[in-house]
C-alpha cells in the first residue's frame, strides 16, 4: 500500500522566527499565509472582514503559488492555494505536497482524501493517541497510507464535487450569518 511520502515530496516551511524582518523601505513586503487563507482556499470564497499579517524582508523565503497543495500542521486541513493567495510567505505551520509523478493523484481528490476520507482520518487519530497537543508533523503526513485509488477520471469527479460542496457549505454559512446579523439589528431597533 502506497503512502503519501511514496507519491509526494513533503516539504515544510521556514520557521517564522527565523525570517529576519527588514526596516529598509525598499525591501519587499509579503503577506503571510495563515489559517484564514487556507480556509478561504478550501472553501473557495474570500472573507473580506479579516486582514492577514505581513512581513518586510530581504530573505529568500518560500512563497505560495496557485495550485499548490498545503497542509496545516496545526489544524490538519489540506487546501489548494487559489490565485488570490499566490505569492504569500508560508511558514513551518504548513507542509507542501509536490507530486513525484504528474497525473498520479488529482489535487482536489488528494485534498478530499486528507480532509475527509475515513481511512486517512483513522490513521491520524491513532497516531495522536495520548497526545495533549495535536500537531501534524511532516513525518506523520509522509507515513499516512493511501486507500486504493480510483481512476484519474473518477478522482477528478470526486475532487470537483468536494470543491463545489465546500463552496456551497461556506455560502450557506455566510447567508446564515448575514440573517443572524439582520435579526440582531432588528432587535436593537425594537429595544430603542
Image (cartoon, rainbow, N blue to C red):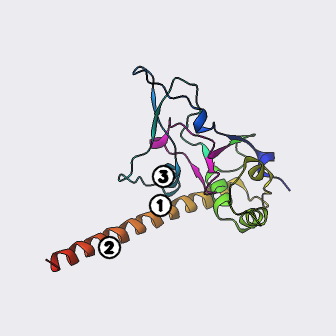
Give the residue at x 58% y 25%: 60
**Pointers 2 and 1 in contact (C-beta within 8 Å):** no
Count of all numbered marks drawn on residues in the image: 3
**Pointers 1 and 3 in contact (C-beta within 8 Å):** no
As drawn, the label of residue 180 is 2
Estimate how packed mark 2 is, as few (under 14), some (14 to 19) or many (20 or more) residues with alpha carbons within 10 Å: few
Distance from disc 1 to disc 3, alpha carbons, whole Å, reads: 15 Å
In this figure, which residue is indicated by the disc labeled 3?
A: 36
* Of the two numbered discs 1 and 3 in the rendering, the one whose residue sits closer to the viewer: 3
Give the residue at x 75% y 39%: 100
In the picture, residue 77 is in which quadrant? Answer: bottom right
Mark 3 or mark 2, which has the lower sequence index? 3
Quadrant occupied by the N terminus = bottom right
**Residue at disc 1, secondary structure:** helix
Relative image position of residue 61 (x, y in whole percent):
58, 30
**Residue at disc 3, secondary structure:** helix
Mark 1 or mark 3, which has the lower sequence index? 3
In this figure, which residue is indicated by the disc labeled 1?
A: 167
Q: Can residue 78 be found in the magenta stretch? A: yes
For residue 131, above or below residue 4: below
For residue 27, above or below residue 47: above
Find the magenta span and give its range.
70-96
Estimate how packed mark 3 is, as few (under 14), some (14 to 19) or many (20 or more) residues with alpha carbons within 10 Å: some
Relative image position of residue 88 (x, y in whole percent):
50, 37
Who is closer to the viewer here, 139 or 116? 139
Distance from disc 2 to disc 1, alpha carbons, whole Å, reads: 20 Å
For residue 149, above or below residue 62: below
Give the residue at x 50% y 29%: 21
Amino acid at each position: 500500500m502506497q503512502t503519501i511520502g511514496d507519491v509526494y515530496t513533503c516539504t515544510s516551511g521556514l520557521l517564522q522566527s527565523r525570517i529576519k524582518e527588514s526596516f529598509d523601505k525598499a525591501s519587499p513586503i509579503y503577506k503571510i499565509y495563515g489559517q484564514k487563507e487556507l480556509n478561504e482556499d478550501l472553501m473557495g470564497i474570500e472573507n473580506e472582514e479579516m486582514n492577514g499579517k505581513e512581513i518586510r524582508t530581504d530573505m529568500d523565503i518560500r512563497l505560495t503559488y496557485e495550485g499548490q497543495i498545503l497542509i496545516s500542521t496545526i489544524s490538519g486541513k489540506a487546501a489548494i492555494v487559489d490565485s488570490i493567495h499566490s505569492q504569500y510567505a508560508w511558514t513551518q505551520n504548513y507542509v507542501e505536497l509536490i507530486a513525484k509523478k504528474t497525473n498520479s493523484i488529482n489535487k482536489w481528490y488528494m485534498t478530499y482524501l486528507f480532509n475527509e476520507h475515513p481511512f486517512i482520518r483513522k490513521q491520524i487519530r491513532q497516531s495522536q493517541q495520548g497526545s495533549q497537543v495535536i500537531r501534524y508533523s511532516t513525518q506523520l503526513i509522509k507515513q499516512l497510507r493511501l486507500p486504493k485509488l480510483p481512476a484519474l477520471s473518477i478522482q477528478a469527479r470526486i475532487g470537483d464535487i468536494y470543491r463545489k460542496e465546500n463552496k456551497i457549505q461556506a455560502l450557506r454559512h455566510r447567508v446564515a450569518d448575514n440573517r443572524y446579523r439582520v435579526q440582531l439589528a432588528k432587535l436593537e431597533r425594537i429595544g430603542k
